[in-house]
Image (cartoon, rainbow, N blue to C red):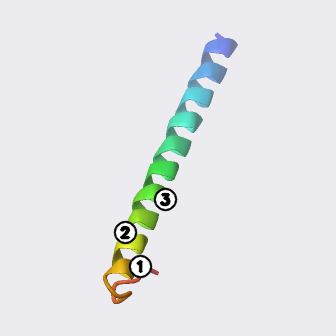
């Protein structure tokens, strides 16, 4: 029972971490695109 709970927590944390990494990749991609367009649309 405890092991199942730990496994669920680890699974949840890893998926949350994956979502953060995806968001960072999208953010940097948009940043690079905006810089190549002339840097008018910097997203800070």
> Quadrant of residue 13 in the image?
top right
Q: Position of residue 10 (x, y in %)?
A: 62, 29
Q: Earlier in the sequence, mark 3 or mark 2?
A: 3
- Residue at x-position 41% and y-position 79%: 43
> Quadrant of residue 34 in the image?
bottom left
- The residue that label 2 is drawn on is 30
Q: Position of residue 1 (x, y in %)?
A: 64, 10
Furthest toward the left, the residue is 37
Q: Position of residue 8 (x, y in %)?
A: 56, 23
Depicted 8 relative to depicted 36: above or below: above
Other residues around mark 3 within 10 Å, as few (<14) / some (14–19) / many (≥20): few
Q: Earlier in the sequence, mark 1 or mark 2?
A: 2
Look at discs 1 and 2 and give the one toward the viewer.
2
Pointer 3 with pointer 2, Cβ within 8 A: no
- The residue that label 3 is drawn on is 24
- The residue that label 1 is drawn on is 43
């Amino acid at each position: 029972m405890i092991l199942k709970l730990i496994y669920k927590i680890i699974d949840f944390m890893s998926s949350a971490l994956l979502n953060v990494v995806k968001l960072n990749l999208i953010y940097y991609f948009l940043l690079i695109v905006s810089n190549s367009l002339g840097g008018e649309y910097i997203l800070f």
